[in-house]
Image (cartoon, rainbow, N blue to C red):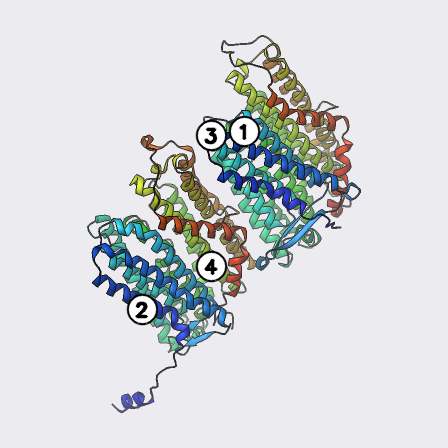
Amino acid sequence: MQMIRDNNWVLSVGTFLPMLGVLVLLITPKANEAAIKMVALLTSIATVLVGVFTLVNFDFDQAGSMQFVAQTDWIPVIKSTYFIGVDGISLPLYLLSMVVTLLVVIYSLDHIPSPGNPKAFFVLMLILQTGMAGTFIAQDLILFFVFFELVLLPMYFMIGVWGGEQRQYASLKFFLYTMFGSALMLVAFLAIFFKTGAESFAIPYLVENGAGIAKNVQVWIFAGMFIGFAVKVPMFPFHTWLPDAHTQAPTQGSVILAAILLKLGTYGFVRIAIPTLPDAAIEWAPWIGGLAVIGIIYGALGCLAQTDMKRLIAFSSVAHMGFVMLGISTLTPFGVNAAVFGMVAHGLITGMLFFIAGSVKERYHTLEISKLGGMLTQAPQLGWILGLCSMASLGLPGLAGFWGEFPAILSAYNPADGLNVTVFRTYMVIAALGTVFAAAYLLWLYQRTAFGTPKGHDHHDVHDVNTYEWVAWMPLLIAIVAFGVAPNLLFSIIDPAVQETLRAFGG
Amino acid sequence: MTLLALSAAAWTAPVIDYHALAPEIVLAVGLTAVLLVDLFTSERNKWLLSVLTGFSLLGATLPVLTLALHDNSVRSIFDGRYVVDEFSLVMKGLFLLAGYVIVLLSSSHVEEGDYWRGEYWFLLLTSLLGMVMMASSRDLVSIFVALEFLSIPAYMLAAWRKRDLRSNEAGVKYFLLGVFASAVMLYGMSLLYGVADSTLLVDISKSIDLDGEFAAVQALAVVFVVVGFAFKVSAVPFHTWAPDTYEGAPTPVTAFLSVASKAAGFIALVVLVLTAFPEGRDVWQPFIWVLSALTMTIGNVFALRQTNLVRMIAYSSVSQGGFVLMPLAVAGGAAGEAALRAVVVYLVVYAATNLGMFGVILAVSRKTRSGDIASLGGLFSYAPALGVLLTIFLASLAGIPPLGGWIGKFAAFQALLTDATPWAYALAVIGAVNSVIAFGYYGNVMREVWMRPVPHGDNTPIVTPSSLQIALGITAIATLVLGILPGVVLNFGDMADLVGAFGG
């Protein structure tokens, strides 16, 4: 794989700039909330500007190569290096993490959840940002692991301190699940390190040499990675932390969780597990595909059974991530392209849906679907935005969701060589059924909340979308439409990198 | 008679390398000075003692540094019974610095209780001297002497608050089980000596032959010695003294026992298995495998159920001990060097983190006067700095990157997997699962600190004495730096070649 080392400072700056903001926040007095908000805002704006610089200087003709590569000694004794770079798969996710953080910060200017303390809240958010961005650029397994874990504690506290009634239970469950996964993942990382001759943790090196590991060993190493990443995705049956975490998390936490954190898992499959262990990937693919379609149906049925709007959106994440995993499990460039597109689309759409849920909660003081109704008459703009996002989420052509979902289903028609075609075509049929369910639960949700007449009596706080919300949401809404109309904006970056990644499968 | 005369005539004074012994000499001078100054100072000026103790420890660190920088040659005195190699220097540095932090942790505690301050500092220094000696001992006798040297003052320190029943219980339990362990160990050592006709570890290593005539005796001896040290490092099922002793002893002493005294036990164990018992690996490897698996699992399970903070830490430190033992379960083969490095790294990181945690506990208990985990409720809301520090230390103990603890766990896993046997993988998976379980109780404390209300709504701020602040600063910086730039300490580990092991 070709490495382009121009401007190799830019990724480090983009990743660690939020930490600078954290340091400034730490010395800002707690009482001065205006200054705290300003520091957080400026930091995330500066981070996005660095992101824009990255985007502008990215060589789109070589999207399959690692760019902005920096490599220097970090822990020489264990042969781990500080090795970072982005290609067409990392870049959209890396930028998405920056943009989403900025939007969440903007939203928080006006919506600090109870019990307040914006200083701690923004510190955690910026630490999260460093962890998320770092995971997408790390090209060394140990570095990846450190960033992957860095997001755990801030999210734990974000749910546990600023969350809903059951926050303590939900935060601990989130933490234990993820940590269990990452502990086994670390063992798997060490195993692949030793099995490739204990030379290097660099991902490109392992991609070159991992294929040489005996197949039965590969299968076991893959199992460790599978658990680590599948918990994070989350795949059925490791998903049970997700509805609790999402329901209890503050709006900001839910948005970040849905938009970025879940992608760390799927990204791990695409970047690490599959390219480094190709033989094992072939063995595991039918199982991954199977769990993915179970997730699709299970998530959809779960959605139909929910009475809480936020919990419903959380279950819909299980279903959507099922489509992403189905795309990945085909091991074809077509499927993985769809999967990466699906990650971005799901980040935009579900992030947006959680924003809306937060605003609904703030206005109606409940998320019980049965107590909501008539949003279109009381807050028409909010109602229409919910409508747009529901349509995007159910995969309406012309909006971003479609390009993640439809090609993923289609790709199962023709999986990579070595995979059982009948099995994958069955998956395809089941997944297609899932889209019908998705239409059902989303339309039903929309019908019950937006149509009809307002219920209940307490409507003092009901008002339409305010300026902070417009500013925070507009970029996401534009992106949902833009990527829906012109998916090639994204596919043209992703595809070369996917081709490069799947070389071992004759892609 | 003639024989005695002959040997007396043949006796020549050994050549003593005073530079190599300088740390021990400084400590010996320091502890004598503490004893004398205590005699001749009035109550008002007893604070001098803590300063003197601190300076003795820092003073002893200087020769450790000069020895480390001087050259790389190994200094061997008394026919190889006392060796100053890189491993021993790293461990001496660790003991002295940990000792210094413990002085910082203790000083306000000791000043405020009206107990026998002079004795406290004297006993602390004596025990540390024993540990520093332990790092260099390469002979059964010198190991045993160093062990008693460090243990006996520790028994007394545990019972230092002599009008407090719990402190008495702590001291007596620690003493009785400690003596029992010494007896078992000594029996094992006598068997080893009986076969090898020498107490030098390298000679014992040559004499061990598990296919030979004395195989059964030697196997028994190896097991006895390992059991003896298993008591010292509170490995399950020999851990029963730890929770009671930790709870009853004065908190700074608990910090000392759980960090320094435990580390001393581990290094003796490492030295023995790597230099004296490599040929006996078929005996001790499976034994330590079982000990390690039991220790981390049982320590964790009990820690989950504790409501008293110090007891929880006691069980957590039992469980952490299991992680230190983990790489030793494969140390007999090619993984020896990696295992040695893992143990050194783990002990360094664990010392920084655990001492820091005790620092926070000491600071908080000045206000709450309670040992319950629930007394930490809402700490973050009224003392954010202490809350964040405690979170950092707990997260480090749980092994969450980028805090120090992860590199310790990582090194342990790495050493274990160097030996690619199914047993090694099985232990790694047990370790991985346990590191998750451990978060159950570390997370529980974090939850109190961040998410629970303040008990009785008592929001009075905490006044942290400056000595505690310095101790917290040192340990927090160490915890962070070790986690983000682990190269620093791993290079130490790389240096830590143990003379006499690995055929060197």
Q: Nearer the viewer, residue B223 or A81?
A: A81
- Check disc 1: other Cα within 10 Å, few if <14, some if 14-19, many if 20+: many
Quadrant in the rendering for residue B18:
bottom left
Q: Which chain does tag 3 point to?
A: A
- Reply above or below: B395 against B149: above
Question: Disc 3 marks which residue?
Answer: A167
Question: Disc 4 marks which residue?
Answer: B343
Q: Residues at marks 3 and 2, common chain?
A: no
Alpha carbon separation for disc pair 4 and 2? 31 Å
Q: Which chain does tag 1 point to?
A: A
The residue type indicated by label 2 comes to: Val
Mark 4 or mark 2, which has the lower sequence index? 2
Residue drawn at point x = 45 percent, y = 28 percent = A115
Alpha carbon separation for disc pair 1 and 3? 10 Å
Q: Residues at marks 4 and 1, common chain?
A: no
- Check disc 3: other Cα within 10 Å, few if <14, some if 14-19, many if 20+: many
Badge number at residue B29: 2
The residue tagged with tag 3: helix, strand or loop?
helix
Q: Which chain does tag 2 point to?
A: B
Mark 1 or mark 3, which has the lower sequence index? 3
The residue type indicated by label 1 comes to: His
Contact (Cβ within 8 Å) of mark 4 with mark 2: no
Alpha carbon separation for disc pair 1 and 2? 62 Å
Q: Residues at marks 4 and 3, common chain?
A: no
- Reply above or below: B257 against A407: below
User: Where does residue A220 sit, x and y in percent of width and height?
Assistant: 60, 49
Alpha carbon separation for disc pair 4 and 3? 38 Å
The residue type indicated by label 4 comes to: Val
The residue tagged with tag 2: helix, strand or loop?
helix
- Compared across the picture, whether B495 is left or right of B166 comes to right
Alpha carbon separation for disc pair 3 and 2? 57 Å
